[in-house]
Image: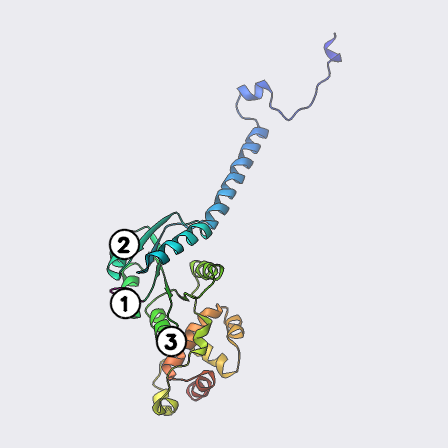
Amino acid sequence: MHLSHIAYIKTDRPTIFEVLSGPCPRVRRKTQDLHAEGHKALQVRRKSEFQGTVLIADDHEIFRLGLLQLLRRSLKVKRFLQAASFAQVMEHLSDEDVSLVILDLKMPGLTASTEIRRLRLLRPDARMVVLSGSECREDILGSLSAGAHGYIVKNQQTDQLIRRLRYILSGEMYVPASLAELLPETTEASTSKPIAELLKIDLSKRQRQVLKGLIEGKSNKVIAQALGIAEGTVKIHLAALFRLLRAANRAHAAALGKQLIG
């Protein structure tokens, strides 16, 4: 048969010459695509998996074990530490891999919510979450003012708990919605505040912005959208404003704020 009669069939497979001489452009492109896809899949998987160690601090072992299994299943946590007392919490924080601490307020050695400040000073890089059965306003505000990144009440459904933890791990601060309904105890002295005393209050720029929104009758959601911050952050500022102004509720805070900033 004459060579001119031979039909050449086009194929995507590399020739023996291309294989011997090194990866051809087609092979390189396919290899690069496979590497890129593999790297992308690994990034997606890593985003869905929790990185680091979770320290669960609660004096009830059954609760600790239940929470451990929930986090292992829902957040793909691989490593845990457990503490039954505040002293054990302090000891475990020497582990540099701890990136999330979940603790109950009612545990041996933890005398007040303000003790959380010690944990934050020791490990400022770790996220601190209070998971407590207490809905007391003082416990919530005390924990948050001490540096906790979130306060979650134990009477949550498991899916709600996971959503709140994901929210905190994303960099936000979680405040229970019930805080707005928990009014501070009012006394005759706190219901009226002289203007001279009000003018002594030093508010941050953000607190003034939130207070202005409150005076204008805006909801937390609208204030958050206007300032470009999370609604939970607005609640934190409002809680601080209520405490500084000794306000009993939103209306009272708005009235006092109008005297303060006009």
| Residue 217 pos. (x, y %) | 53, 82
Name which quarter of the figure residue 258 lies in.
bottom left
92 magenta-colored? no
Residue 123: x percent and y percent?
A: 30, 58
Could you say where residue 24 lies in the image, as x and y percent from the top left?
57, 26
Looking at marks 3 and 2 on the same chain, the residue that comes earlier in the sequence is marked by 2
Residue 65 lies, with reference to residue 232, above or below; the image says above
Q: Residues within 10 Å of mark 3 (few under 14, many from 20)?
A: some
User: Main SS type for the magenta part?
Assistant: loop
Circle 3 sits on which residue?
137
Tell me the element at label 1.
helix
Q: Secondary structure at mark 3?
A: helix
Horizontal placement of 29 versus 179: left or right? right
Could you tell me if residue 100 is visible in this image?
Answer: no
Vertically, is 18 above or below 213?
above
Judging by the rendered image, the residue that carries numbered circle 1 is 115
What whole-number distance in Å separates the C-alpha atoms at marks 1 and 2?
A: 16 Å
Q: Nearer the viewer, residue 113 or 211?
A: 113
Residue carrying label 2: 92
Label 1 is placed on what type of residue? Glu
Q: Residues within 10 Å of mark 2 (few under 14, many from 20)?
A: some
User: Residue 169 at what x, y percent from top left?
Assistant: 43, 58
Magenta span:
106-112
The N terminus, quarter of image: top right
